[in-house]
Image (cartoon, rainbow, N blue to C red):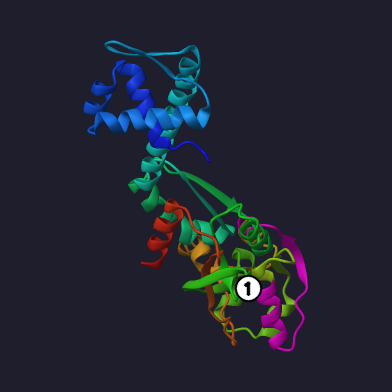
């Protein structure tokens, strides 16, 4: 049987005060309770902890050794309780999130700004990656929350929808004349297409849309970020498939122009995923509350 932690607490107080009665008074217990605890601890450890004197007690060499480690243990426990309190009040801790670039810029960052302003001492760790990266890191417990394009199914993950987003094809000034009229998916497929790399959820989505139109999309340029798609589109290399919110500023400045299609690209949904059976940190739970509202 392991020694009771309360016995150690009584032992420490007695050692510091050198008197059983004073220890009892400080701990608000009876003097026999102090004697009992020390006797039980001595029995458990099989050593004598105190020499009994006429006016109190004095640590034995073995008792002094036990006191040294008992004080360290209680100090560590106190630090642990202090840290826990900081975590509970979000004066410490960390929030680990994964998302793709466009989701980060137009959905996640405004929420993170609000969270960070309210809880500046919580460290925010942000992973930008493809859906497959986010899935694997979520399942490995390396991030707490993943913002993903839907549908996103995995039996070990819990997914909730957040909002809808609209994608579009945009061109630079070199192709501005195409915005004067509606173009068909077949006409679009004849243009130089600027698409995200294969494997991204956005690429899978637009490839499927072309397939539904009875077409096969062939990318002239495959790039790993929407920023690069925007850059090459503005330089006149073709039509880029991007999230409309991501490029709205460039449209307003007439640096990019949205193509009007006879068959509209449908909305996509964005949601967030967490491990299904894992307890979330206090910081993650608070951010989830922000997402849900």
Image quadrant where residue 52 sits:
top left
Say few, some or many: other residues with alpha carbon within 10 Å of mark 1 (under 14 / 14 to 19 / 20 or more): few
109 relative position to 204: left or right: left
Q: Is residue 145 magenta?
A: no
Reply above or below: 220 against 209: above
Q: Residue 289 at what x, y percent from top left?
A: 38, 62
Residue 260 picture location, percent across and down: 56, 80
Which residue range is magenta in the image?
A: 204-227
Closer to the camera, 29 or 168?
Answer: 29
Q: Is residue 20 visible?
A: yes
Q: Secondary structure at mark 1?
A: loop
The residue drawn where x is 37% and y is 32% is 37
- Look at mark 1 in the image and give the residue it sits on: 155
Q: Is residue 120 visible?
A: no
Q: Which of 228 and 267 lies nearest the eye of the viewer?
A: 267
Percent position (x, y) of residue 292?
A: 40, 67
- Residue 153 image offset from top left, x and y in percent: 62, 74
Q: Residue drawn 47% across and 20% down?
A: 48
Q: Quadrant of residue 152?
A: bottom right
The residue that appears at 60% across and 76% down in the rendered structure is 151
Query: What's the residue at 77%, 66% (across, down)?
Result: 220
């Amino acid at each position: 049987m392991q020694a009771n932690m309360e016995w150690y607490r009584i032992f420490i107080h007695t050692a510091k005060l050198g008197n059983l009665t004073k220890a009892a008074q400080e701990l608000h217990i009876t003097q026999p309770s102090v004697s009992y605890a020390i006797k039980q601890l001595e029995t458990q450890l099989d050593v004598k902890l105190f020499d009994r004197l006429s006016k109190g007690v004095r640590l034995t060499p073995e008792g002094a050794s036990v006191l040294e480690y008992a004080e360290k243990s209680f100090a560590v426990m106190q630090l642990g309780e202090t840290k826990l309190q900081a975590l509970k009040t979000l004066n410490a801790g960390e929030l680990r999130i994964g998302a793709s670039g466009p989701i980060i810029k137009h959905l996640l960052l405004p929420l993170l700004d609000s969270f960070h302003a309210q809880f500046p001492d919580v460290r925010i760790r942000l992973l930008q990656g493809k859906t497959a990266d986010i899935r694997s890191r979520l399942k490995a417990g390396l991030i707490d929350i993943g913002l993903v394009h839907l549908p996103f199914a995995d039996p070990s993950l819990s997914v909730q929808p957040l909002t809808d987003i609209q994608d579009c094809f945009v061109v630079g000034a070199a192709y501005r004349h195409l915005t004067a009229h509606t173009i068909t998916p077949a006409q679009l497929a004849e243009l130089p297409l600027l698409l995200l790399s294969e494997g991204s959820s956005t690429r899978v989505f637009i490839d499927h849309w072309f397939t539904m139109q009875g077409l096969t999309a062939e990318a002239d340029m495959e790039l790993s970020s929407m920023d690069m798609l925007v850059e090459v589109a503005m330089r006149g290399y073709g039509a880029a498939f991007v999230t409309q919110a991501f490029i709205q500023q460039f449209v307003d400045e007439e640096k990019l122009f949205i193509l009007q299609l006879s068959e509209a690209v449908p909305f996509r949904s964005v949601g967030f995923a967490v491990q299904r059976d894992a307890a979330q940190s206090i910081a993650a739970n608070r951010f989830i509350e922000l997402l849900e509202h």
